[in-house]
Image: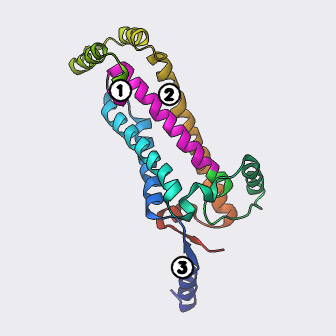
Amino acid sequence: MPPDNANASQRSEADKVYVWDPLVRIFHWSLVLAFFTAYATEDETMALHVWAGYAAGGLVLLRILWGFVGPKHARFADFVCGPLAVWQYLADLVAFRARRHIGHSPAGGAMVLLLIAGILASVWSGLEVYAAEKGKGPLAAALPTAVATALADEDDKGKEDEGRRRNDGNERRGRGGDEFWEGAHEALASLVFLAVLFHIGGVVLASVAHKENLVRSMVTGRKRGE
């Protein structure tokens, strides 16, 4: 590399600022892995699906805590804006005149909240399904002991009768029925997947508009300074 180019590269690195702390970066990529693992697995790989869901839920709860006690750019106070600010930023971004933000942009902050809420709702509905259909998971404690034992025995022996269990679960559990929760779980997972696609599109658009690689910054933790 010619000396001038080497010096320019060194100056460019020196101009970068540290934005994303290790926990935020590890959370981000771990959640990507956990969500897509859960989204792609079920039925024959139910154990993997369940544990990926547990991981996603645990990661989101940790991120919520970090949003109050973490460093500046990890905190909700740094990036949570009102809806008008979000829409204004989106309109400016599409027109390639949006103001650049060191941390999350207003739209990026709104997406963080949307994904947190969506994943928590998806995990909760999945726990409802797991308890109603398998008699397992944290919410299985709400089942009468006899019902939970019968469901667990059926699952262990591989002799489940899905239709009968759904009717029994609906009548005995009295919490809306597993058919409702199963439909809600699938719908919520699909909505989160759709939100992820919008998130990816927004990251690409913002990277082009602001002339920086936002994906790389979530790996290195550094972004171009103001």
Q: Which residues are magenta?
A: 110-139
| First in residue order: circle 1 vs circle 2 | 1
Residue in the picture at 38% in, 43% down? 55
Q: Nearer the viewer, mark 1 or mark 2?
A: 2
Q: CA distance from mark 2 to mark 3?
A: 44 Å
Q: Nearer the viewer, residue 80 or 24?
A: 80
The spot of residue 109 in percent (x, y) is 62, 52
The amino acid sitting under disc 2 is Glu
What element does badge 2 sit on? Answer: helix
Measured from the top left, where is residue 216 in percent x and y?
A: 52, 64
Question: In the rendered image, which residue does mark 1 sit on?
Answer: 43
Q: Residue at x 75, y 54 (%)?
A: 94
Residue 10 lies, in percent from the top left, at: 53, 84
The residue to which callout 3 is attached is 13
To which residue does mark 2 refer?
186
190 lies left or right of 36 = right
